Amino acid sequence: ITIKNSEFMTSAVKKDQYPEGGFPEVAFVGRSNVGKSTIINSLTNRKKLAKVSNTPGRTRLVNFFMIDNICSLVDLPGYGYAKISKSEKQAWGKIIEEYLMNRPDLRKVVLLVDARHKPTEDDVLMIEYLRHYSIEVLVVATKLDKLKRNDIKKSENIIRETLGLSEEKILFYSALTKENLQKVIDEIFSGILP
Ligand code: GDP
């Protein structure tokens, strides 16, 4: 699979602001600063499609992108940013939940985790939530270039164990070297395109 054309559609907070849809949709979630904007830019081969923000936790919108007029990608707000109030965190959670619960087009969620670190409590809550609602999940561990080759297997085991993965796949990705880019693209779109 190759992505030829991608364009920003719209940003939304509430469901009545979502685009009409009717295309299979893949959403990206993960804690703030995990590399969500960066991976969306790499997948689409665009430098600034999803803004790479230097103020983590500031993008609180659901961003929709159209891919080759056949499917769409959705960038959900990053969670787990420490420097915000409890009420702000709840507002964040509501935006993510509103999307996940109200989007019949949603076919798969890509959960991004940092390859170097044990997944956070928020990551665990997120995967449990997705499992509870039987939403298909693909786990992608980002920043592979920051991991020593010898530590990849260990990192995979920690991520698997913390997230309680069994059959589910994990892919490791580096936006710096583009290692595994094609594997990530193929896996994201596998089973969702006609
Ligand atoms: P977001 O908050 O999840 O959207 O994270 P960003 O995409 O803004 O990335 C956060 C920071 O991590 C930025 O400084 C990126 O350049 C950096 N980053 C993202 N992906 C990678 C990667 O694969 N390798 C390295 N070394 N840095 C990365």
Image (cartoon, grey):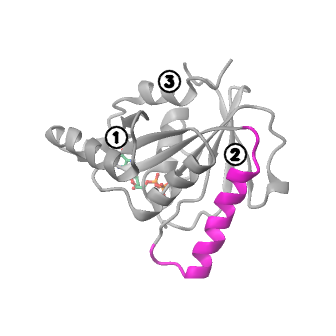
Q: CA distance from mark 2 to mark 1?
A: 24 Å
Q: Position of residue 101 (x, y in %)?
A: 72, 52
Badge 1 crowding class, 10 Å Cα cut-off, few under 14, some 14 to 19, many 20 or more, is few
Q: Which residue is mark 1?
A: 176
Residue at point 69% right, 45% down? 64
**Residue ID for mark 2:** 64
Q: In the image, is the residue at mark 1 within 8 Å of ligand 1 by its beta carbon?
A: yes
- Quadrant where the image shows the C terminus: top right
Magenta residues, start to end: 82-105
Q: Residue at x 34, y 53 (%)?
A: 162
Q: Quadrant of the N terminus?
A: top right
Q: Main secondary structure of the magenta part?
A: helix
The stretch drawn in magenta includes residue 88:
yes
Q: Amino acid at mark 3?
A: Asp
Q: Is residue 73 above or below residue 61?
A: above
Which of 42 and 89 lies nearest the eye of the viewer?
89
Q: Earlier in the sequence, mark 3 or mark 1?
A: 1
Amino acid at circle 2: Phe
The 10 Å Cα crowd at callout 2, few under 14, some 14 to 19, many 20 or more, is many
Q: Which mark is residue 186?
A: 3
> What's the CA distance linking mark 3 and mark 1?
19 Å
Q: Nearer the viewer, mark 3 or mark 2?
A: 3
| Residue at image point 52% right, 63% down | 79
Q: Is residue 184 above or below residue 93?
A: above
- Residue 158 image point, x, y percent: 27, 49
Residue placed at 32% from the left, 48% from the top? 161
Q: Is residue 53 left or right of residue 61?
A: left
Q: In terms of secondary structure, where does tag 2 sit?
A: strand
Quadrant position of residue 107: top right
Label 3, label 2: how far apart the Cα atoms are: 20 Å
Q: Is disc 3 placed on a helix, strand or loop?
A: helix
